[in-house]
Amino acid sequence: MAAQKTLRVTLVRSLHGRLKKHQACARGLGLRRMHQTVEVADTPESRGMIRKIAYMLKCEPN
């Protein structure tokens, strides 16, 4: 079985004062605090959340 691709996502801007939907996307990706880095599966769903809040994130392939 092939290993699933992942993306490394870091929250670089604060969630405070953001739209509720943008905050929900960050929570959905598993991001809770500034400068926290998580690895998420490279799926269309996670890419959509990343695209929606790209202005708050730093994203790199893993």
Image (cartoon, rainbow, N blue to C red):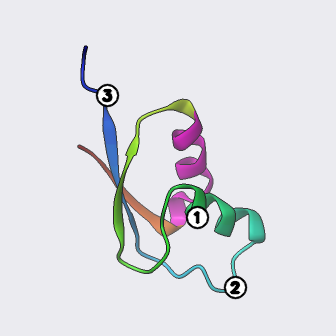
Amino acid at circle 1? Arg
Check if mark 2's residue and mark 3's residue have beta carbons within 8 Å: no
The alpha-carbon separation of the residues under discs 2 and 1 comes to 15 Å
Quarter placement of the C terminus: top left
Label 2 amino acid?
Answer: Gly
The span from disc 2 to disc 3 (Cα, nearest Å) is 34 Å
Residue 25 placed where, x, y %? 63, 58
Q: Is residue 26 toward the left or the right of residue 7 in the image? A: right
Q: Earlier in the sequence, mark 3 or mark 1?
A: 3
Residue placed at 50% from the left, 74% from the top? Answer: 32
Q: Nearer the viewer, mark 2 or mark 3?
A: 3
The image position of residue 54, as x and y in percent, is 52, 58
Residue 25 higher or lower than 32, as above or below: above
Q: Which residue is mark 3?
A: 4
In primary-sequence order, the first of circles 2 and 1 is: 2
Q: Secondary structure at mark 2?
A: loop
Displayed quadrant of residue 58? bottom left
Outermost residue, right side: 20
Query: Tag 1, which secondary structure?
Result: helix
Image quadrant where one finds the N terminus: top left
Q: Which one is in front, 5 or 48?
A: 5
Q: Which residue is mark 1?
A: 27
Q: Alpha-carbon neighbours of circle 1 within 10 Å: few (<14), some, or many (≥20)?
A: some
Q: Residue at x 31, y 31 (%)?
A: 5
Amino acid type indicated by mark 3: Gln
Residue 30 vertical position relative to residue 7 in the rendered view, above or below: below
Looking at the image, residue 7 sits to the left or right of residue 30; the answer is left
Q: The magenta stretch spans which residues?
A: 45-55
Where's residue 2, x and y in %? 24, 17
Q: Is residue 43 above or below residue 57?
A: above
In which quarter of the view is residue 4 placed?
top left
